[in-house]
Amino acid sequence: MMENGEQKIFVWCNFSEGMDDAILHGMMIALTLQKELCLFHLLDRKLHENSEIAEARLRGTASKISPVLSTISVKYLVRDQNIKDSLKDLAELYECLVLVAHKVSVPQLLPVLQYAAFPFLFVSAKANIDQIYKRIVVPVGNIKKSKDIALWASYLGRHNGAMIDIFMADEGGSADQKDVKSNLFSIRRLYGKFRFPFQVIESHTPTWKLQKASLNHALGLKSGLLIIAASFKPTFLDSMLGLTEGKVIDKSEELSVMCVNSQRDFYTFCG
């Protein structure tokens, strides 16, 4: 695949369980946002994988799904490099907008999200995939990244007519509540420019416990997308209370979970 300026939805294809499901979700996102779809495989040096065989497998899969995505270009890419460098190239050379992967790949991918300038979307649902991206939960606390999370939700909101629940933290009478309200004000202003439905839900929960509370809210919807910011520095207490991103994904049942790198600016949607 040649480098070009078209933004792409990448799917993590490691020929393991769940890859076909991840491709279906990637197809859904690509169709919704009208972006190219790219099947991506990173050669496993421990297994001495052959790049020609990997390319042939992806080419076969791409040729099967291309007729279904008549309005979308389907490409594939095989790289032989370390994962950190590959994430950099996906962003800078190949215009990656999001990387879609099955939840079985969480242990491998979540630790390297900190090097990515795009979100990772972890998926597992096999049925009613279109319905998942019609309900989106966005936790909004006192961190700046709340606005980035809300921005990504707006892409699906305006292109898919999704209903967005803004799940708002409550910092009580502390100074942090000002930041929560400021974030909410900015997000309301952004969403007011578009025609998708949204509602603000009071969580009665401080920011540090918001991810877990927003997961419980999303699970109540049965089907939906939860977008969270990954912090990479969980404390012992976070781990014990089940507040880490890995624990959130682990308990997410059939929800899709998008993780945004809280430490880097990400590439924004064009068009």
Image: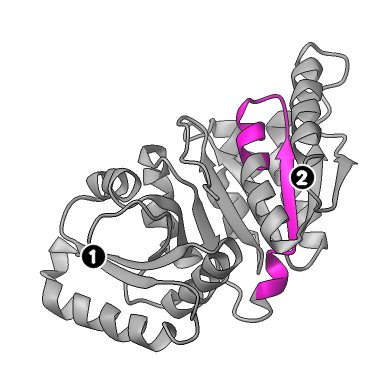
| Observer-nearest of 142 and 70 | 70
Place of residue 12 in the rendered image (x, y in percent of width and height, measured from the top left): 38, 65
Question: Between disc 1 and disc 2, whose residue precedes?
Answer: 1
For mark 2, does the 10 Å Cα neighbourhood hold few (<14), some (14 to 19), or many (20 or more) residues? many
Pinpoint residue 18: horizontal percent, then vertical percent.
Answer: 46, 76
Residue lying furthest top: 175
Query: Eyeballing the image, is 183 above or below 70?
Result: above
Residue 33, image quadrant: bottom right
| Relative side of 264 to 63, left or right | right
The span from disc 1 to disc 2 (Cα, nearest Å) is 42 Å
Tell me which amino acid carries mark 1.
Met
Query: Where does label 1 land, which residue?
Result: 1
Horizontal and vertical percent for residue 208?
69, 30
Instruction: Look at the numbered disc 1 and give the secondary structure of its residue.
Output: loop
- The residues colored magenta run 130-150
Q: Secondary structure at mark 2?
A: helix
